[in-house]
Amino acid sequence: MHGTAWLEIDGRGKVLEKADGLLRGIFRNAWPDFGNDGLGARPDWHRGIDLQGTSIARNVFAVELSTAFALTGKVAYARKALEYMRAYAEGVPFVLEPGFHEDHDRYFGGRGNETLTLIYRCVRWIDVMHSGVMHAPGVFSDEDVFWLVKSLWFYAMQFYRFVGDAMRRDNHHLVDHGHAPFVLGIMFPEFSVARALLDQGRKTILHHFGHNVFADGGYAEHSTKYQYHITYHYLNPMAIAKANGLRLFSPAQEALLAKWVEFNAHACKPDGVLSDFGDEFGGSHAYLFGSLAVPVMSPRLAALARALGYEPGSLSYESPAALAARFKHWKPGKAPRVGLSPHFEKRKAPAKPAAKVLPVPAAQYPHGGYTFLRSAWTKDADYMAVAHYTDCLPHGHAHWDMLSFVLHTQGVTLIGDPATWIYTDKRNWESQEMRGYAYAVDAHNCLVMNDDTLKPIKALGHGCCWGGYPPKHGLGLLRTGGPIEVAELWHDAYAPTRHRRYVVHVCGLGFVFVDLLSRPGLDLRPHQYSQLFHFEGGVEITPGKPAAGQTLRAWKEPASCLIVPGAEAETKWKAWRDERLANLYGVSRSPEGKRGPAPWVAELTRRIQGPSVFTNFLITRPSMDVPSVPSARYLGSEPARWLFQQHEGLSAHALDLGRHGTLYVASCPYGKTLEHAELATDAELAVVLADARGKNTAWCMAKGSRLRVRGRKLYAGKRSDWRS
């Protein structure tokens, strides 16, 4: 963590400002509310843990001060790092708890010395040892060095008690049985148990790699932020192994780790911020590309880093002997600049990415459970991420977010997942209702059937339940790389009804959802289908009370999008501000503490009897310059009335977009066909884009045998899964 972007991006705030505060006994939290707390010249560490549990117990202050020393050469920072490290260890001593043998994940070293807390503190202390702070004359005495190594030896002996335990797949096991013993064993070969620690760590890390890193580059933790966190527990030991001349992973495994880093790039929105799915809000990738990913950095990953706005780092390390030589003639006030990442070394904009090595913008991860559609690797690109839980671990920070999506366009996230901030706002940690809401279906951009959010709020709100067992998804057609991209996804959360969705990306215009809902056998009951749209904090909608079937505009300068309901069935809107998220940090309250209104939620509802198919348009590009607010023209004869059947059994529309032309979308899934002068087809999905002069510029057809537009035959022949 020393010298990395983590300190300012995830840790929030300029590192020199935080270090200056630490000289006065003021600590800044790395988790919401990101506030400053004055603990005084002789800090009350237990009070500090109450205020900033993870930051203080994990000794974030140590690497903030070592980094400030590297940037300035100011000895006061080095002295304060030593003072606080010793004071914390003495003020919050490790307690050998008898409950260790009953449940050693819970009973480890007492308050402030849990397994994860302790290893994070250890690796930060090791970072301090290799930052140059210990070599600054007059700061660390021989007694201080002996105290530090003795403390790390004692902590290593506690992790030695894990040697030989049974294997598991959860991330806590990876950290305390894998990462911790591996790093302590490799960094201190003098310890009598070093070899046993190293072997235990390698065995555990490889076990988790084999079970949890998927062949497609995804990971078993179905939470974008948490699978990003877990990259640390593979890439950090890999970097330390390389620095010490050891091999942890095989070449094939290293290549798969590179694919995992590439997954993180695809999961990153064009503004460089990770998409929000599962527990915790998304964040910057400056730390990933500047530090973590350097053991597997390649021209391809470097180009992705630059496309997302980050200058990639390179592997660098220092031995104590080299540091001793470097500091032999060092003078206080001269910045040593040891271990600084590009975040601190290169404040200018990153170089232009090498376009020829950039991957295709769209990507799907069948095992990891996400589909990413992106118009280009540029800052103003259209971007949509869709979640589809597949081969992931239950209880692993996952949410009930079937086919939920994030929409980012023109540099701004308009439709997101603001409820993810509930997880990190400690005011909600004891609230079952708030925790339950964060995990339940209605907190996400899902299609909710019959108002059923599927899980009792109290069950979801239990601190150990997390996401429970989200419903598994299935994948169908996938076609990317052309002017019209299509992904077919489905889930059975409302079994026996299956919800199937075609996600269509019309490059240069936006996105379309075609939803199909049906069940085996006769179904004459009316069902309610409500598509939820959760807008990010600061996004406004017009109108605030949309009428039935009306087009809704969502905007936050300079971005805008139009949500256009299909007209194959009667629709009704409802919009409200999500007061559950009022005053939530990062949503209606900024990290700087400024309050704002709660974010908007819009709900688009249909009531249809029996099987149904319907379409919704999310138009991004022309939303600011169409001649009038567009509405979808239904190309069938008789739209379904509220609570009645869709007798025509199809959805077909023309969306007139002025100088941008006309977008045609049709779906005929139930044996009926569309016969209209503008569009005729029997396909389950047909998409045609015509320019303002009526010329067809792009088209595709899935699961059909014919397609005709304004009398012109585009395809007629054998039924085909895909034509374009």
Image (tube, rainbow, N blue to C red):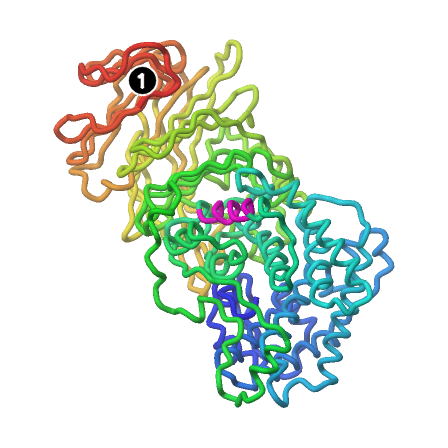
State the image quarter where residue 329 is shown: bottom right
Query: Dividing the image into 4 quarters, which one contains the C terminus?
Result: top left
User: In this rendering, is residue 13 above or below 162?
Assistant: below
> Which residue appears at 52% of the width and 48% of the height?
258
Numbered circles on residues, count: 1
Dominant SS of magenta comes to helix
The residue type indicated by label 1 comes to Pro
Name the spot of residue 295 as percent of width and height, x first.
54, 57
Please give the residue where the numbered disc 1 appears in the rendered image. Answer: 639
Q: Nearer the viewer, residue 657 or 372?
A: 372
Q: Is residue 383 magenta?
A: no
Query: Dividing the image into 4 quarters, which one contains the N terminus?
Result: bottom right
Decide if residue 41 is on the left or right side of residue 285. right
> Which residue appears at 80% of the width and 49% of the height?
165
State the image quarter where residue 52 is shown: bottom right
Q: Secondary structure at mark 1?
A: loop
> Which residue appears at 42% of the width and 49% of the height?
300
Q: Nearer the viewer, residue 313 or 597?
A: 313
Query: Which residue occupies the extreme left position in the image?
Result: 693
Q: Crowding near pointer 1: few (<14 within 10 Å), some, many (20+)?
A: many
User: In this rendering, is residue 499 above or below 410?
Assistant: above
Q: Nearer the viewer, residue 346 or 687?
A: 346
**Which residues fall within the magenta stretch?**
255-265
User: In this rendering, is residue 434 above or below 115?
Assistant: above
